[in-house]
Structures are given as structure tokens and as C-alpha cells.
Amino acid sequence: MKFGVVVFPGSNCDEDMFYVLSNILKQETVYLWHKDHDLKNCDFIILPGGFSYGDYLRSGAIARFSPLMQEIVEFAAKGGFVFGVCNGFQVLCEAGLVPGALMHNTERKFLCKNVFITPVSKTALITSEIPSGKALKIPIAHGEGNYYADEKTLKELEANDQILFKYCDSNGAITPESNPNGSLANIAGVCNRGKNVFGMMPHPERAADVNLGNTDGLFLFNSLLSLVEGKV
Amino acid sequence: MKFKAEIDVMPLKALLDPQGKAVTKSMVNVGLPEIGNVRIGKHITLEIEAPDEKTAKIKVEEACKKLLANQIMEFYEFKIEPLS
């Protein structure tokens, strides 16, 4: 398995993601520069967190038109795996690779703290190995993480089992109080209909090293690895 | 011919605009309690080289749909005038 971590001007979680993939998961990992057209034969493309293009206009709105993104759109259309975290999720939404949009948090604050999320989709690679009802402690760090989609889209997401994670409390209960940013139906992450493009606001790469005192993010990476390895 | 477009990009009317809500609340503090329902968006100006106004309008529509507004959460309005 070869992972490619995309670097946009303003990406700032690219090195954390690279470290987790290469040093902790022991996977071949390379950086991919946004101005290139070369995906370097990667099996899995990661769009990391940060502030691509300074979040100008809207988060992710300009990054989606970078040369490499045109290749990633084609790669995804052929069934290639793509995973966007935080700003990477915003880029995926802007590119139309996953449904919905990310608005300003309802309280307008930039939120940087641990939250709990629980897996919802039973059929998406990224959640399928996480025990149902489990509450994972994963940090968020965003100003625009308020997930929104219209009613019709929400119904489709539910009908096709495309909701990856919902914000919950420490016991796994999905409550209004555990929703940090006003996201529709507590949604923290979704995938596309083909279930090969995944996006989420919380940062699993910040919760994957035992030295940092929290390895809940590894549930997600391991789930993704073991299932993807069978397909690549 | 050169045209100038003035574009307003606003949050969809049905969606909460937290920025507008915060500003609405502060109207009381500046002694203007009669002001309500503040909504905040973006005002964008740009110039277009086009043979006529109709073509310029088509180009602005395209810019709004492709880049300037995200129609999942925003709507846009614009006016165009020739630059003398």
C-alpha cells in the first residue's frame, strides 16, 4: 500500500499525517505537491488539514482547482481511495467529491479540543471495523466545521449508509449537547456513494501516537488499512 | 468592451448566519434596538472583457457557479455595467 499526502500552500497537518502513516503504520508514504499532475502510483490519497490558500473565499474553494485535484477527481471516479481530514474534508466538499458543505461553527469560535465521535456506517471501510456504539476521543481544530446538506441529500446519505461518524458524548450517545459546531444531525464525517472517498472534520492523525496519550485514531487507521489491503 | 460586475454572495435565507446574529445582538448595545435580522455576506467586484453585456453576464454567472458562491449554502445576485 502506497499513501500520498497532498501538500497545498497552507497545509499544516501534512507532516503529522505523514508521520502516522510512515512511522506508526509502517506504510510507504510520499508527499504530493498540489501543482503537480503526478499521483506517483499511490493507492490511497490523503488531503490533510490546514488552511489551504489561507481559507480565502471559502475553506477549500481555491484548493479544489489546483492541478493535482483534477487528477484526484479522475482517480476517485475510477474508484481510487481518497481521505480528507478537516481542511481536506472541506476541499472534498467544494470539489463535489462528497456531498454537503461546511459552514462557520454556530458559535463563531475556532474550536480546538477533544470531542467524541461514534461510527455510523456499517459498510464504509473506515468505520466497518470499529465496534458499534464505541465513542472515540478525537480532537477537532476548526472554525468552519458545521456540516450542512439539504433535506434530500441527508435522506440519501442515510439511505446509502454514507454517514461515517456522528458527534456523541463519552458514552457514545448522540445528543445535541455533544454537537460542538452545529453540524446537521451531529454529522462529523461522510463518504461518497461509491464509498471510496471519505471526509471528516476531527483529526485522527492527532490521536495515533502512544506518546501523545491517546490512540483512538488508530481504530480508524487500522480499520482502513486492513480492509483496503484486501482490495489493492 | 470592458464591463464591471458587482456581486453579492449571501448565506441562504433558511440557514442560520451566526455572524449576522452576533451583529444583530450588538445593535442593542449601540442604541439601535429597532434594527434586526442582520445578515452578512460578501460583496465582490470584478471586471470582464466581453463583446457585449449578454456575454459578460454569462461569464459572471459561470464565475459565481464555479467559484464565487457555494450554492449548497449561499446564493448570489449581481449587476453589470459597461466601464467607460
Image (cartoon, coloured by chain):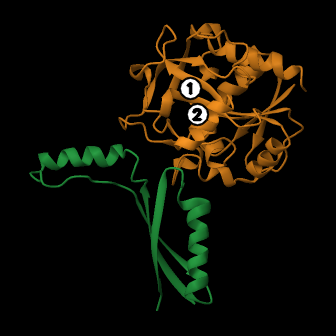
| Residue nearer the viewer, A23 or B53 | B53
Residue A88 falls left or right of residue B9: right
Q: Residue at x 72, y 22 (%)?
A: A126
Q: What colour do you see for chain B?
A: green
Q: Amino acid at mark 1?
A: Pro
Type of amino acid under label 2: Cys
Chain drawn orange in the picture: A
x and y, in percent, of residue A51 in the image: 56, 41
Query: Regarding mark 1 in the picture, which secondary structure is present there?
Result: loop
Q: What residue does disc 1 label?
A: A202
> What residue is shown with label 2?
A86
Residue A31 is left or right of residue A188, and the answer is right
Quadrant in the rendering for residue A89: top right
Crowdedness near tag 2: few (<14), some (14–19) or many (≥20) residues, C-alpha within 10 Å = many
Question: As displayed, is residue B37 above or below residue B45?
Answer: above
Query: Alpha-carbon distance for marks 2 and 1?
Result: 6 Å
Quarter of the image with the N terminus of chain B in it: bottom right
Residue shown at 89% from the left, 20% from the top: A230
Residue A182 place in picture, x, y as percent: 42, 32
Residue at x-position 61% and y-position 75%: B59
Badge 2 marks a residue whose secondary structure is loop
- Which quarter of the picture shows residue A10? top right
**Chain ID, mark 1:** A
Residue B47, above or below A71: below
Among the 4 quarters of the image, the one containing residue A30: top right
* Front residue of A100 and A34: A100
Q: How far across and down, in percent of the image, does residue A180 sit?
A: 43, 26
CB within 8 Å, label 2 to label 1: yes
- Give percent across and percent down for residue A83: 71, 32
Please tell me if label 2 and label 1 are on a single chain.
yes
Q: Say which label, 2 or 1, has the lower sequence index.
A: 2
